[in-house]
Image (cartoon, rainbow, N blue to C red):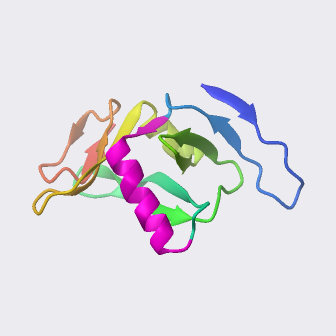
Amino acid sequence: MIAATANTPSTQPNFRVSDERLVRVTASAARKVNSLLARQGRLSGVLRVAVVGGGCSGLQYKMDLQDGPANRDILVETNGIKVVVDPKSALYVTGSELDYVDALEGGGFKVKNPNAASSCSCGESFTA
């Protein structure tokens, strides 16, 4: 799954490169992420996807726009978007698809995660 290691000077973060088997972004989500990056003036920025403790099922997703990958991150380019995932979160999101639904109710980013054993009724947290 991990294709290469980025060779960068010591002042640059050391990260690995993977492919869509780790995480895939749909065209709809890619358009939204590009729009958000442009609004923030981060045209070469990345979307960080992380799994943190919390929510009613125990784990929840955290997404953030950043300038680039950090040390030990895994970088995936999918549908024209750069996504970074830390190694611990990668254990939980491998094989996931990130979509964006533009709707008044129930809209926003949605994660289809094959590793989720169950999720809460609101769909905001999960167990693995």
Relative to 128, is 36 on the left or the right? right
Q: Quadrant of residue 107?
A: bottom left
Residue most extreme to the right = 9
Relative to 29, is 65 on the left or the right? right
Residue most extreme to the top = 1
Q: Quadrant of residue 76?
A: top right
Residue most extreme to the bottom = 40
Relative to 2, is 119 on the left or the right? left
Q: In which quarter of the image is residue 106?
A: bottom left
Nearest the viewer among 101 and 48 is 101
Residue found 57% across the figure and 68% down from its top: 42
Residue found 62% across the figure and 65% down from its top: 67
Quadrant of the snapshot with the C terminus: top left
Magenta includes 95?
A: no
Q: Measured from the top left, where is residue 54 in percent x and y?
A: 33, 59
Residue found 49% across the figure and 68% down from its top: 38
Magenta-highlighted residues: 23-41
Residue found 29% across the figure and 41% down from its top: 127
